[in-house]
Structure formats: structure tokens, C-alpha cells
Image (cartoon, coloured by chain):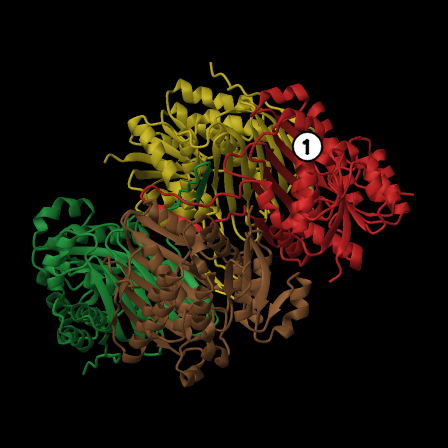
Chain colours: A brown, B green, C yellow, D red
Amino acid sequence: MKRLTCGVIGAGRVGLMHIENLLSLSTINIVGVSDLFIENSKTYLNDLGIYNLYADYEELLKDDSIEAVFIFSSTDTHEEITIAAARAGKHIFCEKPLSMDLKESASINVLREVTKNNVLLQIGFNRRVDLQFKTIYEQIQAGAIGDPQIVKITSRDPDLLPHDLIKRIGGLLFDFTMHDFDMARYMMQSNIVEVYAKGGTLIDPSLKNIGDVDTLAIVLEFENGAFGLIDNSRRAVYGYDQRVEVFGTKGMLKAENVSESTVELYTAKKQSMKNPLPIFTERYRYAYKEEVNQFVEAVLEGCPLVADGFDVIMAQRVATAAQESLLTGKPVKVDPSLPIIE
Amino acid sequence: MKRLTCGVIGAGRVGLMHIENLLSLSTINIVGVSDLFIENSKTYLNDLGIYNLYADYEELLKDDSIEAVFIFSSTDTHEEITIAAARAGKHIFCEKPLSMDLKESASINVLREVTKNNVLLQIGFNRRVDLQFKTIYEQIQAGAIGDPQIVKITSRDPDLLPHDLIKRIGGLLFDFTMHDFDMARYMMQSNIVEVYAKGGTLIDPSLKNIGDVDTLAIVLEFENGAFGLIDNSRRAVYGYDQRVEVFGTKGMLKAENVSESTVELYTAKKQSMKNPLPIFTERYRYAYKEEVNQFVEAVLEGCPLVADGFDVIMAQRVATAAQESLLTGKPVKVDPSLPIIE
Amino acid sequence: MKRLTCGVIGAGRVGLMHIENLLSLSTINIVGVSDLFIENSKTYLNDLGIYNLYADYEELLKDDSIEAVFIFSSTDTHEEITIAAARAGKHIFCEKPLSMDLKESASINVLREVTKNNVLLQIGFNRRVDLQFKTIYEQIQAGAIGDPQIVKITSRDPDLLPHDLIKRIGGLLFDFTMHDFDMARYMMQSNIVEVYAKGGTLIDPSLKNIGDVDTLAIVLEFENGAFGLIDNSRRAVYGYDQRVEVFGTKGMLKAENVSESTVELYTAKKQSMKNPLPIFTERYRYAYKEEVNQFVEAVLEGCPLVADGFDVIMAQRVATAAQESLLTGKPVKVDPSLPIIE
Amino acid sequence: MKRLTCGVIGAGRVGLMHIENLLSLSTINIVGVSDLFIENSKTYLNDLGIYNLYADYEELLKDDSIEAVFIFSSTDTHEEITIAAARAGKHIFCEKPLSMDLKESASINVLREVTKNNVLLQIGFNRRVDLQFKTIYEQIQAGAIGDPQIVKITSRDPDLLPHDLIKRIGGLLFDFTMHDFDMARYMMQSNIVEVYAKGGTLIDPSLKNIGDVDTLAIVLEFENGAFGLIDNSRRAVYGYDQRVEVFGTKGMLKAENVSESTVELYTAKKQSMKNPLPIFTERYRYAYKEEVNQFVEAVLEGCPLVADGFDVIMAQRVATAAQESLLTGKPVKVDPSLPIIE
């Protein structure tokens, strides 16, 4: 099978984790890596058989053999690097968001470059290809539950993040709930027209100092008249709690948490061994691989992308409205029409 | 064991169902029944061994042997009959609400009579004694999940009600969701301070003509800072869907639906036999008996009531606020302080 | 609905439990009770509204209003009383076995009297009407799993019985496993042709003194070529463990234990609240009522009996063979042909 | 981390599957492969980066850089090749059995060479490291269920094997049930002293022609007095059915089947999406990797082997006795003492 020749931009802590994931895939051939501090990772990357290393990503983009780039650099560089990669004619896999700038025009600028240069851009909404959620999606498409009327998403992290990390990647709504906004819209196949968000600092009151919350309860309204409910927490002591339920005219689909264990222990004291998987890297291990495989198929064979630039804009638009709802204490209308890229 | 000598007011369709339930309990002795159309039920009640039958409930209240009355008459008579029963010195078991009048003063009038005449009044919030929900409540009280932060209630009816019945008993919020408001407050042991309700007629658009909805998504805020999410539907084709989940600092409790079957069928086509019980009479069969037993214990032995007049006022207050939220499209504040009965 | 006028023979500890069960049924009218020590239960039975009380069961049998009798007297009286009841023209509901005499001719004698006098005899194999096992049976009959090939029964009691009770009612094979032999044959709809039983005293070695075991592992062969596996224990500390699984050419059916709770508790330590119901009176509460209802329907409307005299003989035949297998250490052939009652 | 330099003997259909598995492990470095028909796999193996290819395994054994060999050649070559590898000083990973010769002396010969040459020999009893069964084993060791009294193993293949393959690898008892015998002994940590096996050709009667069965029901007795029950079928239409249950004085542990899906579908018709994984390669994917990792740790760091030569002899001894039981229709005693290798 033909493999996709790729470069990676960003080899920090998260970047290296992603690189290891990419190396386990037979669909990808990584020929170069750039990072501002590339010297730190040199030995490690050489050991993995990657020898073309750059401090400047522009140098990597000059490698004509590279067909696609994976952008794992810090969020504040996404906008600039995506535009540069598009101009260099590389297909792009980028983590959300496209821009730190909450004004949508910034993200639209990026999309315009992507469109103009005729390259593909996939966003890392990996949950769309999770085995459980994909099954729900496919069952809905197959008509198993008729017309969807209510989508419920429970999404709880195992623990708090450091405040300085939150400052860099965004608070609960932008770092975490944004995945749920995308999932809700994906399941419903309808855009969101209103969001009402209640949030609080029930775990770590000092989050107020950086304008963040640790607990959220959210109601959504969709363009097709359906409703959504999302609840988030930063600390579920029993594991990484990720459940989706969709209710419709002909039935209901729900995905329970994934547990490594099917073992049940029965004693006089009543116990069992089934807790959710503990963290996103384990829970979405398959999805992290699968999204890359689908990106490769999109580039090489014209298959659909898992999620594109419009998808990330729509999710970010809801997160921004939810933020406004948190601040004003009122429901906020959301424009359900896709942005137009002239 | 001493049995409680009781009278029943209201022997229509619902009343007769309740009477049969009461007769299966060894804690109760029913000596009289009143109903406007008592002639219709005469043979039936005589066959059950009940011979003191009245068209006028005032006559029944004159029977000095009667210690307590069960009020199963139509909602619009609750207020008048409860007051009369209190004045006659009878302990009272009454279905919600206490009054059709949404102004709280009407219900407070009733409570004042109850208090003045020193009788007990229990409201039929039977879900509080449901085996599953009681277990969750007890586990929370025992500290199993630490401080509760999020309560989620899924409550879906198997099918639509006739429009004329809705006009008599109230729409989705007052007939159905009010149970969820009481459950949410009961689980959290904290009063509700804000409600935001989104509703629609996704199943039967003609409900708009009588000002009702068939689908609801609701966010609650509690006095203790916690949050609640409720979703309702009038038509779950797979059965009566009744689930409660409470998330806290040290864990999570959830009650799944009750199914009659533990049988699993595995074939090449993948099937199973476990659907929820189909309707409230089956799902809450135990609770309907248990609430009466606890009422008897309250009267005879001074044990606590399952739910009292304050509980129904607090639930109705949230339902009224939710109704306002539906109409205005805005979150509505709710006064969390209990009414004062001078 | 017409009710069946009945007498009860045997009002000891177990008999009184059964009488209370019978009284909760609207299909039965109990007009008389006999017991050797009837004086002991007089007040109790009078309070329940039963006034015709006899020390001698022959007196009860003379009551012409009685259409059917329930025999709850001690096992060693079953043979004599069943014969007398048959001769008195009463329909009979009797607990297993028909005779303490392991020679089949004793039970056949009883059946001959039943046949000659044209009365119905139902054996209390209540598990046949248990909701779970009935579902499996009906699914098999409906072809859901094709031809059954393997039946597996796990049947574990919550605790040891007193030695003197074992001496009166029979050891593990005759008191307990006999239900499993009947269930296996019922599920397979094929008679057993061989049994191999391994047994031990893993819980209470002193059981050896009375020739009993507390743990059994059994393999069955059926006339249709299928196989059965049964495992028994007298002490499952986690509750009354009752599971049945049937595997066939087109699929597999299994009934898991029945639990009162659907509540799940997730904490950092991983717990749940779902243990089996603790004891047979709770686990088979429905079945104990249902078998009587079906007996009444058999008498009044000619519906099929739940289990008849042939069924108990076939089960006892396997238990006797299993006992021989235990003693000889060898598999023992079982005659699969029904006894002939001339 | 140091990697183990290895050779692979046998690159047929199964061998290539194993090689791909080995290549995905970071603990292994494969430097050579031998196969009688090595030309057929040359391109494929070269593409995988393996260039030292041999038709004669003796040539591969001469490569001094090779520390360990994996033997995936046909069963009838295990004995000869294991001995040669031991004499060449290579650590050995071999699939069961050690010899086609049912006389134990053949396997003991192999062990003698392994011992004399001071190399490690691991048998591919991969189920011992399966996540579910390992959890049960560890819980038993930790005392969670007290003293184990009954072990139950359900092991059903998804479909029949071709007759000629059965002739080469052995029938149901030797190819399939042998894993269950090892698992039963491993869970109980006690040797088997008696086996009684009932078998039949309920799926494919023509199996009689080659002396095989497709369905088995087996009872085991252990040296410690405990019992075991095993049921096998060659065709479970709903997937690869692999369950283990262990019952003890203080509780019960059971491992249910592993399903890829946690999605539940509720409709008016009652369905679900949870079937077992379909085949052993998926069900034991983790175990196939983990057994190799543990073999590497045994070689490099002196950790314990997953299963050694004694383990395979003990399992084969039971399979042989079970075969005799099938033929004679009698229970067969099994010597529980380990063979002695002088």
C-alpha cells in the first residue's frame, strides 16, 4: 500500500506522544520534524529513524517530498503555521482550534488559504471515529432510532489541569467542551441555534482567578428543533467518563463507558471490577490512530475528512456563545449558517 | 399489628386503581369511599367488601372511626377537600398538587389548615421510596460519593396523553416534570434557585393549541452551587425510561432502568431481551405500596412522612418558574426559602 | 372470576408460609386447614378468616365443598395423603417428592390412584414458571437458538441446612438438585439417559456422617444427544445464585441472576450494588404465586399443569442415579422412558 | 531498552500472522526466518525488513546473534526443532504441544534437553495473560474469593475446522480443550486427578470418520478436592465465547465475554449491539503480544515464564485421559504429580 510522506511540526511533550502514535501506523512515513527546541528531541527522534530535523518549520515545508504535515505545536501558532503550510501546498492535519483569536474572521482567513491552495485540512476531532460513538452515528444514519430529538453528553475529565496550561490552551469550554459541541452537532446532523451554560468552580474555587470553571451544565437547541444536554466536570475520581446518548422517535442509543475489564466479583460485600478507562489516551487510543488513517485515505484516495475547518469553526462558535452565556447568565443565540469562504 | 382505619375520596378510574393497591396492604383498613358518581362503583366496591359509600365526601368525613383519608379525586378538588379533611381532624394522603391555583398562597392556605388542625399531610411523591432512587439517596447520605455536584434525571413517558386529560391535570411540567423537580431537590438536599427550560412539540405539534410541550431539556441551579439536568419526553417507544444519576466529589451513583428480564439472547444478529418496564404502574408498583406503608407508620408511630406540603410547594414553585422560562426564553430565578405558615 | 375452593393439609412452619402466599391470590378460596398440631395455629388461622380446622386430614377431605387440596405436610406423609386425597376426588397440589421411598413403584402407586380417580396432580416445580426461565423456555420453543445442544445450570444455596432437616427432606441431590434435573429436562424437552455426579464436602466435612455432600459437579446426557452441566453449592456467600444457560445451533440464551438493584456506584475503589436476591422465597416469589394460578386454571379451565406426576418421577429417577454415581464413582445410565400407569 | 534478538522457525499461514504480531513489539528484534518453503515468503519478509532467510532451520540456529527462537512450524516438527534449538543454546518459545506423540516420554525427552542446555522454554498458553483471566487469577491469589471450590470454563469456537487441518493439529480435545485444561489447573493452582468427558458430533456427524467430536461436556476433580466443569462447542454462531468463573468460600469471580461495543440500542423491538468478539485473533490480541513480552522479560531479566514445559505436559496428560474417557465412557484417573526430569 502506498504510504503518505509526512512532516511533523511541533515536538514538545504532546507532539512526541503524537509522533509515537504516527510511527505505529503503516499508512504514514514521517521524514522530517521541526520544533523550536529541536535539539532537545534530536537523539530520541534519530533513534526512531527520523533524521531530517529543523528548528524552523519553514525549512521543513521546503521539503518537496512531504505531502502532508501534522501540526502539534502550541495553540497560539496554529493560525500562522496552517497558513504557511497551505501556501506550501501541504495537506494539513491540525488540532483544534485554528486560531487563538475568538473572532471568527481569524479562522476564516485560515480556511481561505486552505481553499485557495487546494489542500486538505483535517481537524483532530478524534471522537467522531471512536468505535462507540461511530456506532451510534451509523445507527442513527441507518434510521435505527428514527428522528433524533435529544442528545445527551456526559464528559468528565479525571482531574484538574494546571492553571498555566489552562492559560495556554483555553479553559474548560474551549479545551474540553468544544469536543462535546462538535459531537452534539455531529450526532444531530443539525447546527446549534442556542446555548445556555451554567458553570461553577465546585472543585477549585481559585479557577475564578483565571476566569475558568470546573463544572458545567449546558442546554443546546438545534436548528431542527431538537435539544442537547451536556454536563462536564474536571474531576471524576472514578476515571475518564465519556458517554453519549441519543433519543429519537423510534428508539434510543447510548454508549456506556469503555472498561478494560469484564470481570465481576461477587462477595458478601458486593463489589465489581468495572470502572471506565482512566484517561483520554487510553479511552481514545483507537480513535487517535483511526483519525490519521482516515486523513491519509482522504489525501490519497479522496475519501471524506473526519472533520474539516468548518466543523471547528462551528464548534468554536458555540463555545464562544457558551462563554458569553456564562458571563451574562442568559441563553445566547448562535448563528447556524456555515461561514462563507469566497 | 394495628391497622389504620381509612376512607377514600374519589373512586374514578385512577381512584379505583389506587383502592385496589390499598386493599393489598395489610397496614390499611378501608371502611368508606365517597365519589360524586358513587353509584357507578357500588357493585365493584361491595364485592371488595366496602359497604359505606357516599356521594358527598362531607358525609364520609363525619365517620368518626376514620383516622385518615386518601384523596384521589380530580386535581381541581384537592384544595377544597384537603381543607375539609383537615378541619374534620383526619390525616391526609393527597396526590400533587395541593391546588390548581398556581399562586402559592392557595397551597399555603391548605398547609395552614393542616397545621392548625394538627393533622399529617403526605404528598404522593412516590419516587422517593422507589427501591433504586432510595438506594441512591441513602448512599449519598452515607457519603458514598462525597458532596453531590451534578444530578441528572432522564424521565420519559411511554406515550402521549389525550389533550382533554392534559387540560384537567396540567401539562408536561406540572403533571410529569414536577416529580423530577422534587427528585432533584430530594437527592441534592438543597433548594433550587434557578431554572432554565427549553421545550418543544417534537412529537405532537397540535399540543401548541393547549399550550403544552412534549419534549423538555432543563438546567437547574441549586442553592449549594450544584447543577441539575433534566430531559423529558412524552413518548419513549421502548418503555418507561426513568433514570437518575448523581455525581459528586468522591464518585458517581446511577440507577439504570428496571427490567423484568435478565435473559440475554445471543445470535448471529445480536439481540437481547432487556427493555425497561413499560409503564409507571409497573415501574413504581413497589413505591406505590411503600409510600402508603410509610404514611401509616407516620400516623401510627410518628415516623417521618415521605413528602409533606412544603415539598409539593417547592416542586410546584420550580414548575411555575420553568413554565415562565419556557414562555420568556430566559432563565428564571426561584426563591429557595420555604414558605412560612403562621 | 370463579375462585377455586381449596383445603390445605399441613400448617407447620413451611405450610403457614405457603398459606399466606395462597391468601394473597384472588384465584383461591381456602375454606379449611388440617394439621396434626392444628391447635398451635388456631388463632393465627382464625385471624386470617379460616375457621374449619382439623387435626385429622381425613376430616378435611370429607368437606364436599373442597375441590382441591394443597399438601404441605412433611415429606414422609406425601404418599399416604396424596392417595387419600385422590380417592376423595380432590385435585392435588403437592410438593416434590411423591414418596420417601426411592423405589419408583411407590410413586407409581400414587399416580395410579390419581389416574383412576380422574383428579389432577400438580408438583411444585415452581422454577418452570419463573419469569426468567420461562422466557428462555419460550424462546427455545420459538426457535430463537435452533436445536439446543448444551444446557448449563448454576444453582447455589445461600447457606447450609441443619443436619436434622436434611435427614427429613433428603440431601443435596434430592432436596435441591432435583429442581435442576427437572429444569434441565424441561429446557431440553428430552429425557436424561446418563448422569455422572462428582460430590464433596468442601464446606462442612461432618456432612459425611449423614451421607450428604455440599458441593456437586454433574454431567448429563440427553436422549436427543445433547449434554447438560450442573454445579451446586450449599453456600454462596453473595446470595442465592440461580442461572440457566442454553446453547444451540442458532444462538445462546442465558438468564443472569435477579437483583433488586439497578444502582451502580463508581468510586476510585470500584464498587457496585448488584448482588443476587438473597434467598429462594424472594427469588421465586412470583413463581410461587404463578404455579398456583396455573394449577387453578388447570382445574377450572383445563389448561396444562405446570408439572405433573411423571415429571417428578423422572427427576427423582435422575437424582437416584446421581446418588448411585456418587457412591460408585461411575456414570450411571438412566431409563429415559416414562413409567406406564396401567 | 535492550531488545531480544530472535529468529523465527516456520513462516506458513500461521507463522506469518505471528511474525506480524512480533514485529509490532518493541521488545523483539527479528533477524532471521526459516521455512521449508521460504521462497514463497521472501518478498513479503524482505518488505518487512527481514533479510536472513533460510529453507533449513539448522542454518538459522547457527546464527550466533540469535538469542531466542519462536517455533511456529507444524505440530509434527515441534519435538525435533525444540531439541535442536535447545542444543544450539537458544531460548525457545513454542506453541503446544511439544510432541505429536501422546506418550509423555516424548515430551519429557524434550524437557530433558531444555534443562541440560540451560535454556528457557515457554509454551504459548496465551490465555494466562489475557487481561480478564489474569484479573481473576490475581484476585484469587489476593484472597478475594477465599478457597476456590468450583471452576467453570465455557469455551466455544466460532466455527468448524477443515478435517485435514484437524488431522494435522489434533482434534477438539488436543487443539482446543487443552487450553481449558491448562486454564482450569492454573486458576485452581492444583493438579487434576480425574476427568470425565462426554462428547458428541452434534454439528458435523462426519467428524466421527476422523475420530473427533464437536461438542464436549467435561467434569474435573482437582487434587485439592475442588471440581471443574468445561463445555466446548466448535460452532457458536454469535462469536468466540470465552468465559471463566471461579467460585470459592468467600465469593465468586467471573469474566464475561469481551465485546468491542458498549452501545445499547433500545427500540420497541428490544435489541442490543453487544456480541462477543468474533475470533481468537481479536479476543486474545493483547495476550498474544503480552506472552511474548513476558518471554522476553524471562530471558533478559529472569522474570517467570508464562507457562513452561511442565505446564504443557500436565495439560496434555488431561487431554489424553479425557480422550480415554470419551472412548471408554468412564471417568479416568489422572496422575497429579509433575514428571521428573533427571
Residue B123, image x and y in percent? 24, 66
Question: Is A224 rendered above or below residue B150?
Answer: above
Foreground pick, C277 / D2: D2
Residue placed most toward the observer, D20 or C35: D20
Is residue D227 in sight in this rendering? no
- Residue on which disc 1 sits: D173
Amino acid at circle 1: Leu
Measuring 34% from the left and 29% from the top, which residue is drawn there? C298
Q: Where in the figure is residue C303, as x and y percent of width and height?
A: 33, 27
Helix, strand or loop status at disc 1: helix
Q: Identify the subunit bearing mark 1.
A: D
- In the displayed orientation, state which residue is furthest to the bottom: A209
Coordinates of residue C128 in the picture (x, y in percent): 44, 35
Q: Percent position (x, y) of residue B335?
A: 23, 79
Residue D313 in the figure: left or right of residue C140:
right
Q: Residue at x 80, y 43 (%)?
A: D310
- The answer to whether residue B288 is left or right of residue B273 is left
